[in-house]
Each structure stands twice: as C-alpha cells, then as structure tokens.
Image: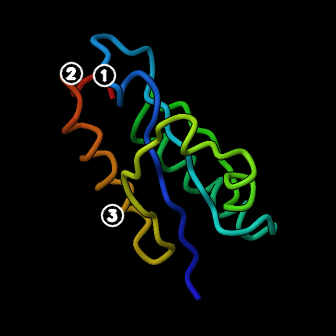
Amino acid sequence: MAQSVTVYGFGSFFAGAAAPADIDLLIVHQKSSSGSCTYAITCKHLIRATILSAHITMLSEREEKQLAFIEKSGAKPIGIISENTMTTDVDRIRGTIGGLSLDRNAL
C-alpha cells in the first residue's frame, strides 16, 4: 500500500497577515514506524526545496491526536502527498500556497 501524508497550513501566512515571516506547514504521517517517519522526512525535504520560506512541523496521526495540534493552531488541510505522485502533489501544494500569497516570489 502506498504511503501518504497530509499537509496542513497554519500561522500568520494562512491567517492573512500582511508580511508573514514564513509559511508554517504541518505534515501528518500515518504511523510512528521508521518507514512512515522516513517518508514524512522525504516529503519535508521536497517541500523545502520548492517552498524556501516553509517552516515545517511533522507529527504522526497519534501524536497529532494527543496534542490536538490542528484544532489548537487552526490548521487547514492544503494537500496530500502520495508516494506514487510525490512531485506532482508537492507542486499542487505549492500552487495552492502561491494562490494565497500576495507576493509569489516570497515562496
């Protein structure tokens, strides 16, 4: 079965701040296993290579539930990165973020 992660946006950029310092993203991966963590790290590197101002937090689904991070931060889902379509999925997420940005060069 192909792995996937869900990417959420939160923080000042997604709240519409005029001049956010960075773009806060959360990657939620399925399990706490080595394979799931490694896949999430790979996704993090791909995102950072295309969205230079990204500040990325990673949590497993279990950790996120324990912390209630999504609820507390007001994070909104912005995309899913699947193992079989990683590059396309990251490009789609970048496009979603770019569509929210007043300054596309800030990405």
User: How many numbered circles does the render carry?
Assistant: 3
The kind of secondary structure element at disc 1 is helix
Which residue has dot 2 on it?
103
How far apart in space, not on screen, are marks 3 and 2 (Cα)?
A: 22 Å
Question: Which amino acid, mark 3?
Answer: Thr
Furthest residue in direction bottom, as rendered: 1
Among the two numbered marks 1 and 3 on one chain, the one whose residue lies closer to the N terminus: 3
Quadrant containing the N terminus is bottom right
Residue type beneath disc 2? Asp
Q: Are marks 2 and 1 in contact (CB under 8 Å)?
A: yes
At a point 54% along the width and 31% down the height, the residue shown is 55
Residues under numbered marks 3 and 2 in contact, where contact means CB atoms less than 8 Å apart: no
Res. 26 image quadrant:
top right
Instruction: Give how far across and how far down residue 66 sits, in percent.
Output: 75, 51
Query: Could you say which quadrant of the image residue 17 lies in?
Result: top left
Q: Residue at x 31, y 22 (%)?
A: 106
Query: Which element carries disc 2, helix, strand or loop?
Result: loop
